[in-house]
Image (spheres, rainbow, N blue to C red):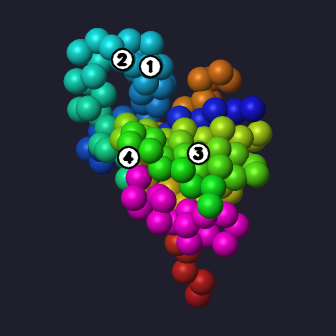
Amino acid sequence: MHLYYVYAVKEEISKEYYYKTELLFRFFQEYHNQSHKDLYKLQFSFITKPFPENSLVCLLKKSPKYNQRKLVEGEKVTKWVETRGIIEITKEMCLIQCNSFMEAEQILFQKLRMIDRCFFIAEYHFKQYGWISPQRKEMLL
């Protein structure tokens, strides 16, 4: 199983660090190890914005593939259980646990592109990371 962390990054940070993904990856990895320290909390809040939980939940509920009864909302975490994966949404980030990147793409990443283009994805076990790519809108002539 793969566990992907998705962060909503502020637009000005995404522009500045678009080609510095390794630096962001190392910071987020260190943040998870040192999140109890105030300096890391300040840096994290400077880099990220609150995760758009409501927008994502609305898109998940509209999808015909999902069973709305499997949505569990708590005080701090919204958990969406689906046969191919589990999504957990907090104020700081979104986590998806699934078998492959393609499943994560189908279950979550496509919907995130509809919300914003400034999402950074990290999978720490296999050291995979990068920006969610916006869908190209090509015109046919």
In this picture, is 76 found above or below 127? below
Assign a secondary structure to mark 2: loop
Residue pointed to by mark 2: 35
Q: Amino acid at mark 4?
A: Phe
Q: Which residues are magenta?
A: 53-68
In this picture, is 10 found above or below 2? below
Assign a secondary structure to mark 3: strand
Quarter of the figure with the C terminus = bottom right
In-image side of 86 versus 42 (left or right): right
Assign a secondary structure to mark 4: loop
Q: Secondary structure of the magenta portion, mostly? A: helix
Q: CA distance from mark 2 to mark 4?
A: 17 Å
Residue pointed to by mark 1: 32
- The label shown at residue 87 is 3
Q: Amino acid at mark 1?
A: His
- Nearest-to-viewer mark from 3 and 4: 3
Q: Amino acid at mark 3?
A: Ile
Residue shown at 67%/72% (left/top)?
64
- The label shown at residue 51 is 4
Residue shown at 55%/67% (left/top)?
61
Q: CA distance from mark 1 to mark 2?
A: 5 Å
